[in-house]
């Protein structure tokens, strides 16, 4: 009798063991703005993708962190970011007074943003999303990564060809052996969502522990009503946080201090400035009614073969490295030119088939202040997802990336490579212009608009010979002979270009 049961028991035990292992092409750990965009793009690029997020919501800092007033990339509706932006705008369109103009700052309630992301992911084939699913360990086994996640209280092993670290500060990469630059510094802030409960309401909270009125002096010389309007979100709510982040060595004490400081800001508005009717909104369901996730504003960049510096933003065409040519995402900010983010910034040294995002990308601290915005991170995430899918699909590693193929995939899904704002995606030549910009043949031109600097392609301008000659000289060893023979004038004609192509390809004109 026992012998007869042995085969059945063996099969049962084997099936049970198999059920405890999940196999996927790409595993994304962390569902922040960058991680969720990476997972969506990876799956849309036709590879099996799993996204695990420890928290209950997708979106990271822009939902669980409450950072729901996004002033970056408002005129660069790149791919998945543009899709998310459009769905938020469509959701609020019926509400009186919501700004639906093409380049408006995006404003939304955190819970609404999280729900929109969930609905987008629900429609993506090849994508499985697991929220409330922490991870505990990562190790390399041969050519695969083995990651332990906790699902319903049980340890489950995930085997993946490629892992994307979608955490805020590179926790997965650190445990996987990635080395970081020495400037790691934890700086945090905390967001409160306030609501106007009507002029007769009194929502004054108890005086927070350690409250110091001097900590909110940045509001003394401001019109508080105008300041609140700057951070207004739909349904009479406001996204507020104290001025500047705080740093410290003890993580738990730092978070506690940051939360008390934000409660102090609410108390200051109510008690000192007389806004008793503006109180904490229970958007998140936390005990103190603040965003459950702190805003991490410090940078912890991974060591990579390249590192993006401020000159890559301020004067990308003057840099010998020409990193803009390897762009996989774009960004814009206050007071700096719109910029491209290079592929190499997400690829750590020595640890293969693991990609970094968020604060762990290889950038300097001043660049981090421009790339950390969730709108920029979502644009970058699409490039990360395309890169991960490339490795899985072609069965290769992050040592052997072909940037033009990855860029082509990003363009296929309407992602920007170059931050040209004067050529909309509706233009039939949008893709070609993006590709031309990425070669460096024709360079973008800065155009100051208010407090930002847009980059324009100026598609209706004539092309000067001086503008393109350096590029031709770079790619074609016989270019100097061609220029001597053809002697093009000040402006390059269509005939000049056709003859150049004929000479370059050794074909009849």
Image (cartoon, rainbow, N blue to C red):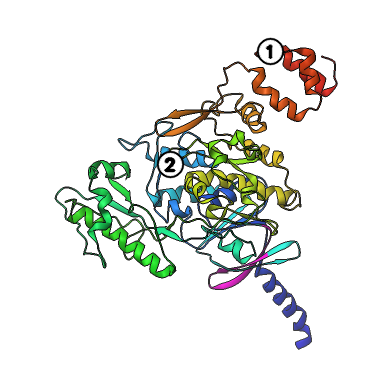
Percent position (x, y) of residue 64? 42, 56
Q: Residue 349 carries which label?
A: none
Q: Can residue 149 be seen from the camera position used here?
A: yes
- Kindly state the secondary structure of the residue where label 2 is placed: helix
- Kindly state the secondary structure of the residue where label 1 is placed: loop
Give the residue at the far left of this rendering.
200
Identify the magenta region. 146-162
Quarter of the image where one finds residue 245: bottom left
- Residue toward you, 313 or 376: 313
Residue 111 colored in magenta in the image: no
| Residue drawn where x is 25% and y is 63% of the image | 211
Q: In which quarter of the image is the N terminus?
A: bottom right
Residue under label 1: 493
- Position above or below: 70 against 453: below
Percent position (x, y) of residue 289? 32, 61
Residue 161 colored in magenta in the image: yes
217 displayed left or right of 37: left
Q: In which quarter of the image is the C terminus?
A: top right
Within 10 angstroms of label 1, few (less than 14), some, or many (20 or more) residues?
A: some
- Magenta: main secondary structure: strand
61 displayed left or right of 7: left
Q: Can residue 286 be seen from the camera position used here?
A: no
Earlier residue among tags 2 and 1: 2
Q: Which mark is residue 88?
A: 2
- Front disc: 2 or 1: 1
- Residue toward you, 420 or 18: 420
Percent position (x, y) of residue 110? 39, 51
């Amino acid at each position: 009798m026992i012998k007869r049961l042995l085969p059945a028991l063996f099969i049962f035990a084997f099936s049970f063991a198999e059920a405890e292992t999940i196999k996927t092409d790409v595993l994304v750990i962390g569902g922040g703005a960058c991680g969720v965009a990476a997972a969506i793009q990876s799956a849309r690029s036709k590879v099996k993708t799993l996204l695990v997020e420890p928290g209950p919501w997708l979106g990271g800092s822009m939902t669980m962190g409450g950072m729901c007033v996004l002033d970056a990339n408002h005129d660069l509706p790149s791919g998945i970011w543009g899709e998310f932006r459009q769905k938020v705008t469509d959701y609020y369109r019926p509400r009186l007074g919501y700004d639906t103009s093409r380049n408006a700052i995006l404003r939304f309630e955190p819970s609404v943003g999280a729900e929109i992301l969930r609905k987008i992911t629900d429609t993506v084939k090849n994508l499985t999303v697991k929220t409330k699913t922490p991870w505990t360990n990562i190790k390399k086994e041969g050519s695969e990564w083995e990651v332990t996640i906790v699902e319903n209280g049980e340890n489950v092993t995930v085997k993946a060809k490629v892992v994307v670290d979608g955490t805020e500060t590179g926790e997965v990469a650190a445990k996987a052996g990635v080395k970081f630059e020495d400037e790691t510094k934890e700086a945090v802030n905390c967001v409160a969502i306030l609501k106007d409960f009507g002029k007769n309401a009194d929502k004054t909270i108890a005086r927070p522990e350690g409250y110091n009125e001097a900590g909110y002096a940045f509001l003394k010389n401001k019109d508080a009503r105008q300041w609140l309007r700057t951070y207004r979100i739909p349904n009479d709510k406001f996204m507020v946080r104290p001025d500047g982040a705080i740093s410290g060595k003890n993580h738990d004490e730092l978070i506690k201090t940051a939360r008390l400081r934000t409660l102090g800001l609410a108390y200051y508005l109510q008690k000192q400035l007389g806004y008793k009717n503006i109180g904490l909104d229970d958007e998140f369901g936390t005990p103190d009614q603040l965003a459950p996730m702190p805003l991490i504003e410090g940078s912890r960049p991974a060591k990579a073969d390249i590192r993006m510096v401020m000159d890559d933003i301020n004067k990308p065409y003057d840099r010998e490295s020409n990193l803009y040519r390897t762009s996989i995402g774009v960004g814009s900010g206050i007071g700096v030119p719109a910029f491209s983010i290079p592929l190499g910034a997400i690829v750590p040294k020595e640890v293969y088939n693991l990609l970094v995002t968020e604060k762990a990308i290889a950038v300097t601290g001043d660049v981090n202040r421009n790339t950390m915005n969730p709108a920029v991170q979502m644009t970058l995430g699409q490039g990360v997802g395309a890169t991960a899918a490339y490795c899985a699909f072609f069965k290769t590693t992050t040592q052997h990336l072909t940037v033009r193929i990855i860029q082509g995939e990003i363009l296929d899904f309407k992602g920007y490579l170059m931050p040209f704002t004067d050529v909309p995606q509706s233009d039939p030549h949008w893709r070609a212009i993006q590709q031309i910009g990425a070669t460096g043949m024709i360079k973008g031109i800065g155009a100051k608009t208010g407090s930002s600097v847009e980059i324009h392609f100026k598609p209706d301008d004539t092309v000067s010979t001086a503008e393109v000659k350096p590029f031709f000289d770079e790619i074609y060893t016989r270019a100097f002979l061609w220029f001597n023979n053809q002697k093009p004038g000040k402006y390059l004609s269509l005939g000049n270009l056709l003859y150049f192509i004929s000479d370059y390809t050794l074909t009849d004109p």
